[in-house]
């Protein structure tokens, strides 16, 4: 018999309580919750369900975004010692949607840089890329960010004109920002400032897109910085075998990192 989402959530809470995880800094809690998802299968487009935008909960299978956002939502509940499924869903909605409110497809935070920016405004995350490396090292993500509307056929919900027009407005707003990233060729020089539990957006050279993959920074027992993530179709949540630096080098579409850190509660 398949385990449902509420049961999985409660299991995370039970081990958190038994290990008194709430006493730890939020980044440590993120790592422990993230590791508890290791072995969870990957699912693509996990949030694209139904015609009406609503809170989708799926802890049984994860993509790269739903992995880190569910980890963050549960970790925040643990830190607050609010151990109910309803508390978790409230945190998830607060994190996933612009200003914490479901107001249609466009209110979901689709672009990672926008996700980090809005969650910084809500006091949930802090974009620490500018603290990791000096401004003369950081590069600006090319704009406009318009991948979704220029690839309208790839997004079921953008077939509806209202959703499409609202996404055009959102993309224009995002494109007006200066979004800085740490180039992957500079990572070895500055990776000591990245903390285990930081949330990473892997930037890309794909036109119109800011980030093509996400995950959580993980420093192993030898101090090697790796990536805790939901890799791809047919795979499961895992810690990368390669160092983060080697992982980024292995893909020509990866250009660097935007780094966000959960605010302690």
Image (cartoon, rainbow, N blue to C red):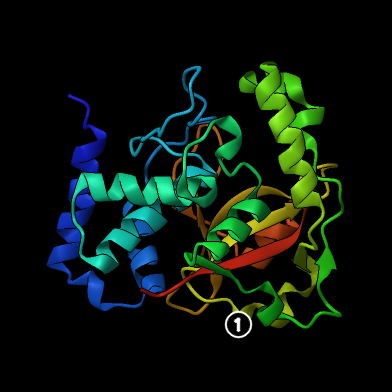
Residue sitting at 48 percent across and 21 percent down?
52
Residue sitting at 62 percent across and 74 percent down?
128
Viewer-side residue, 96 vs 27? 96
Q: Is residue 213 above or below residue 131?
A: above
Viewer-side residue, 231 vs 94? 94
Is residue 1 toward the left or the right of residue 189 in the image?
A: left
Q: Which image quadrant for residue 241?
A: bottom right
Q: Position of residue 109 (x, y in %)?
A: 58, 44
Instruction: Pick the quarter of the image with the N terminus.
Output: top left
Instruction: Pick the quarter of the image with the C terminus.
Output: bottom left
Task: For residue 38, say whether it is visible.
Answer: no
For label 1, the crowd category at 10 Å Cα-Cα, with few meaning under 14, some 14 to 19 and many 20 or more, is few
Q: Position of residue 73 (x, y in %)?
A: 37, 54
Task: For residue 149, say whether it is visible.
Answer: yes
Total numbered labels placed on residues in the image:
1
Q: Which image quadrant for residue 72?
A: bottom left
Residue at the disc numbered 1: 193
Q: Which image quadrant for residue 246?
A: bottom right
Residue sitting at 12 percent across and 65 percent down?
18
Q: Position of residue 88 (x, y in %)?
A: 29, 49
Residue sitting at 21 percent across and 38 percent down?
6
Q: Secondary structure at mark 1?
A: helix
């Amino acid at each position: 018999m398949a385990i449902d989402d509420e049961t999985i959530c409660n299991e995370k809470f039970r081990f958190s309580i038994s290990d008194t995880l709430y006493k730890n800094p939020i980044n440590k809690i993120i790592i422990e919750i993230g590791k508890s998802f290791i072995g969870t299968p990957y699912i693509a487009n996990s949030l694209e369900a139904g015609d009406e935008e609503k809170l989708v909960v799926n802890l049984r299978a994860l993509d790269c975004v739903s992995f880190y956002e569910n980890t963050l939502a549960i970790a925040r509940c643990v830190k607050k010692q609010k151990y109910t499924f309803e508390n978790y869903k409230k945190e998830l909605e607060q994190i996933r949607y612009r200003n914490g409110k479901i107001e249609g497809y466009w209110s979901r935070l689709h672009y990672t840089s926008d996700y980090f920016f809005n969650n910084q405004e809500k006091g949930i995350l802090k974009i620490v890329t500018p603290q990791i490396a000096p401004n003369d090292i950081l590069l600006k993500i090319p704009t406009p960010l318009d991948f979704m509307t220029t690839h309208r056929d790839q997004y079921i919900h953008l077939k509806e004109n209202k959703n499409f027009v609202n996404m055009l407005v959102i993309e224009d707003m995002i494109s007006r920002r200066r979004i800085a990233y740490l180039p992957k060729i500079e990572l070895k020089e500055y990776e000591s400032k990245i903390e285990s539990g930081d949330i990473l957006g892997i930037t890309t050279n794909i036109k119109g897109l800011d980030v093509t993959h996400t995950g959580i920074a993980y420093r192993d027992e030898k101090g090697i910085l790796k990536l805790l993530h939901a890799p791809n179709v047919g795979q499961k949540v895992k810690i990368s075998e390669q160092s983060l630096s080697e992982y980024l080098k292995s893909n020509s579409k990866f250009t660097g990192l935007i780094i966000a850190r959960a605010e302690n509660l």
